[in-house]
Amino acid sequence: MATQGKGITRMAVRGAAVLALALAGSAIAQTQEAPAPTPATDPRVAALADAGRHLLAYRTKEARGALVAVQDEASGDAAIAVALGRVLEQEKKYAEASTQLQKATALAPDDPAPHLYLGETLLRQKKATEASAAFTRAADAAAKAVAADPANASALYHLGVAQQRLRQYDQAVATLAKARELEPGNVLATFQIGVTRAFQQRWADAVVELTRAVEADSGIAYAYYFRGLAQDKLGKKDQLVLDMQRFLALAAAAPEAEQAAAILKAAKR
């Protein structure tokens, strides 16, 4: 890749660090996921599952719609409060999102997920110190759950994501790998390993993991963004273009969309 392309990637990685992602944050990155609904599933579980899938694909309007039937329960249900907070974040209503997610942490102080999402929203507001404190609380809560049950794949996943946000990258990969081993169908663990590898500048490894993620679920918007950055570093301009196009097709309203469009324009010159 030309020097210009390498500069593009450095710029994009710095911008992505605001996500601390992955998040999909939002897109990144993602993560108190309810099981897929079945005919016997109650409306709450189905609503959370639908909202979670829409949020990963950055279909924010659809995610909000999926929660309409249960949103009145948010005052007493941490999972619903988290989902609504994530919607507000994707709507770029960051202060409202923070308020909603703080309520979720009060409802479930020992659940790492609300703390993780609160941290992401605080990063969007450039409140790095507060975000780090939220990620630390998430890590502590997840570590406590893992200590109680080393086979708790969900707790391991949340611990791995928290470690990633705290820049403990080697630990994050090891923890996320354990989560995936216990729960092979957890595509988000694969996605987060890929993002962590990108943060470590292990570009080839990032491409492998992120490709594995999108092959399992083509709706993870930020997987294309981060894979595109990695493809750029590996000198694969055509793949960079394809991945940024896919990201923009899914997440045209994402905070990183403007930067992705600039990268795409420069790459086509």
Image (cartoon, helix red, strand yellow):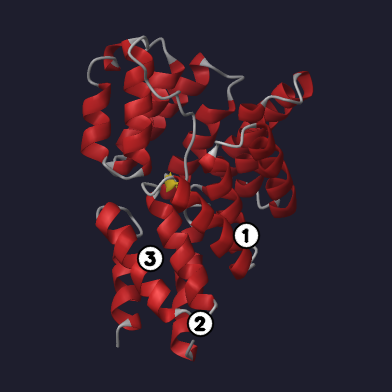
Q: Which residue is mark 3?
A: 243
Residue 265 is situated, as x and y percent measured from the top left of the image, at 28, 78
**Residue closer to the observer: 37 or 11:** 37
Residue 3 is situated, as x and y percent measured from the top left of the image, at 49, 90
Quarter placement of the C terminus: bottom left
Give the CA separation, mark 3 to mark 1.
17 Å
Decide if residue 91 is on the left or right side of residue 201.
left
Q: Are marks 1 and 2 in contact (CB under 8 Å)?
A: no
Q: Label 3 crowding class (10 Å Cα cut-off): few <14, some 14-19, many 20+?
A: many
**Residue closer to the observer: 42 or 82:** 42
Q: Can residue 45 be seen?
A: yes
> In the image, what residue type sits under mark 2?
Gly
Residue in view at x 66 percent, y 42 percent: 176
Callout 3: SS: helix
Mark with earlier residue (3, 1) = 1
Residue in view at x 41 percent, y 33 percent: 98
Give the CA separation, mark 1 to mark 2.
17 Å
Which image quadrant is residue 62 in?
top left
> In the image, what residue type sits under mark 1?
Arg
Residue 204 is situated, as x and y percent measured from the top left of the image, at 60, 69
Residue in view at x 28 percent, y 60 percent: 248
Give the CA separation, mark 3 to mark 2.
14 Å
Callout 2: SS: loop
Q: Which residue is mark 1?
A: 197
Q: Which residue is mark 2?
A: 235
Decide if residue 194 is on the left or right side of residue 214.
right
